[in-house]
Amino acid sequence: MKRLQIISSVFFALVAFVACGKAGTAGLASDAAERVYVKPGDKDEIYMFASGGFSGQVGVNGIPSGRLIRVIPVFSQWPETGYGYDETTKNMLMTSHGFVPWDDSHHPQLSVTEGKQDGRWLFINGNNTPRIARIDLKSFETVEIIELPNSAGNHPSSFLTENSEYALAGTRFSIPIPNVPMAWEQFQKEMKAGMSFVSIDKTTGKMSIDFQVLLPGISYDLGRCGKGPSHDWCFISSYNTEQAYKMLEVNASKKDKDFVMAINWKKAKACVDQGKARMFPGAYRHNYREENQEAVSESLNGTKMLDPKDCPGMVFYMPTPKSPHGSDVDPTGEYIVAGGKLATVIPVHSFSKMLKAIEDKAFSGEFFGIPVLKYEATLAGEVQKPCLGPLHTEFDGKGYAYTSCFVSSEAVKWKLGTWEVVQHLPAYYSIGHLSIVGGDTRDPFGKYLVLLNKITKDRYLQTGMELVQSAQLYDISGSNAELLLDFPTHGEPHYAQMIPASALKKQTKILRLEDNKNPRATKKESDARVVNEGGAVHVYMTMIRSHFKPDVVEAAAGQTVYFHLTNLEQDFDVPHGFAVFGSNAPNVLVMPGETRTIKYEAKDRGIFPFYCTDFCSALHQEMQQYIRVQ
Amino acid sequence: MMNRMKIGTALVTALFLAVALAACKKQSGDNASNDSGTGIGPVSSVQIAAGIDEGMAKKGADLFEAKCSACHKWEEKVVGPALQGVTTRRKPEWIMNMILNPVEMTQKDPTAQKLLEEHLTQMTFQNVTQEEARMILEHFRKKDGAK
């Protein structure tokens, strides 16, 4: 206990250290309980979509209550629903490396139209096996995952352009492209970073890799695309411009400044359209699931690769102190705020000054042929001594920015234009990202700020050697931010985005049986049957409260049995589950009107039960039948 | 047709009423005395012509097979009650309202309340139109040998 107290004291001392200027420190609102209380029967005002970090999923919390109301499986298998295990969904997790049942998900971004949230889709990156997933916000299901070749660590991803024309995805790890082993000294010279421009279909949301850009091999980190005047550009931070490949904690922190990269996506697209890109090899998978259909996994190879030297004026580097992390664009599209992770200032670049610097050729040099602009030429201002370890910034739409600071464990509120810190908001503890409702868009909703922390220490009852990550909710609607709530999150939510619940009202409640186009569907009980096809047993089975049809199933030992399960219910929130004795797969949940297929190897002779796993009715316990294996 | 919000609210209400119902049986007896037997829902009167409209009954039979037969058989109870003789036990309006508005029916209609107590599974609305419910009724009339 003493140790915990010491830890807490250190954090408070750090906060106190930076809070000794004139800016005050936010405290707990006196009526906090009332402001986060959602009384029984009422609903939360806001949806929060939090990346599941090393769980690979997305958590959905209601705000202001902080309640976890859903986990959406994305990059990892999820036995709760059978996602990634059953025949219907397992193709979603196919990659060029085979079946990969996990990833490390970091940065969700809600789709935008004219820079404002449109409530259609949620995109999120997979870091370890570079992928981008799209979740449909009508069904809250992962409907598409595209793999990114020529990338080794999809951390700087997925950043949407102002009308969701493109999702940009860079790489945190540079590699030889094409990737072949070589001497370490040579590797240092040849490391490259492929940045993918993934186009998004306006109507269907479907993704495809339009082209890639072959960038100098440094570590790209985070970014945002522009809005309004900066519509054509995206701004990506970087570290390790030293190009170290070992002991990066020392070797990648030698320079005073790294870069924020400004890349003109419109110009890149124009160069590609003029035939300036070359085909590069690179195997990848494109997986998608049409409504209620078996997921398709396409095996693809090769992308159009654009070399910056073939497209002058497309990319520039803005020197930025020091190993910057976040690179965030304010609602007007003019300011690009870099979290100078190891710097004592928060540097802010001006988009209009950047354009002028490019026009005036105010370059301080070149980096692998790419012009490096003069720091002073693009600088709008610096927030002086804001905190220790500034990382990420979001905006309230009222002229203020909030930046998270890892080392001093707080967020700082500061004013755009005057660069003056006005308030310190303690985080418990060691904050990473922060999120304001719509805080990265042209039109922030504001009102709530969530701090997403890395270390929990003394905030919850101990649960063994680890505690879940904590988050704090602040009310930022008044002139001073006030702390409202502490709530647990799961995995390690790096980033989260929030949207008013009123924007997500058009959700699917059931699939009408008439609209069930799955070729394995059984839409009425009289069609339920068992068919032997090529030695395998196909069971076309219906589920309704509280029985399955056919009544009994027969198979021979050694046969593979496919249960094609259709839930005949047409009633919202009445899925049926299915589990069979001795199966090597988990249960599958079938939503009302939908069809899912699960594979069962009939290894042993005997009579084995199967049953409904999701409590469905007063006679749920009776929803149990048998398969006989002879 | 009820919108989804109403159904949601109705469900919550149904749950409360189910609790209330169990707690005060006498009240449901009182309701019975005011019961007109037409049920509660969008159908207040049904025109029944002499004889059977065979076309309608055929369409009704197909709809019944697709949307109702998983729970209802003619001669035996499955999930819901056996339906044989239903057109002589209940008014045509009641039958159509039960098809179109089962949740509110099992909360408020004394006969439907008793059926829920007996069968213990909430009947669900199966996405049929009023016209389709009428066809199902015609199918029932034919099965019951209506002239």
Image (cartoon, rainbow, N blue to C red):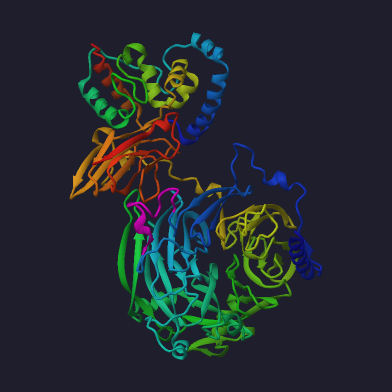
Residue at point 31%, 48% (across, down): A600
Secondary structure mainly formed by the magenta segment: loop
Classify residue B31 as left or right of residue A302. Answer: right
Is A56 above or below relative to B54?
below
Q: Residue furthest front?
A: A605
Give coordinates of residue A615: x percent, y percent: 45, 36
* The N terminus of chain A, quarter of image: bottom right
Q: Residue furthest top?
A: B33
Residue at point 24%, 17% (across, down): B142
Residue at point 64%, 52% (across, down): A487
Is A255 above or below relative to A118?
below
Which residue is more in the foreground, B41 or A68? A68
Residue A90, magenta (yes or no):
yes
Is B133 above or below relative to A62?
above
Classify residue A106 as left or right of residue A341. Answer: left
Is B8 above or below relative to A372?
above
Which residue is more in the foreground, B124 or B51? B124
Give coordinates of residue B114: x percent, y percent: 45, 17
Give coordinates of residue B56: x percent, y percent: 24, 24
Q: In this view of the protein, can residue A522 be seen by the observer?
A: no
Question: In the rendered image, which quarter is residue A570 located in?
Answer: top left
* The C terminus of chain A, quarter of image: top left
Question: In the rendered image, which quarter is residue A479 located in?
Answer: bottom right
Which residue is more in the foreground, A48 or A175? A175
User: How many numbered callouts?
Assistant: 0
Start-end of magenta stretch: A78-94
Residue A152, magenta (yes or no):
no
Q: In this view of the protein, can residue A236 be seen by the observer?
A: yes
Q: Residue furthest left?
A: A534
Give coordinates of residue A235: x percent, y percent: 53, 74
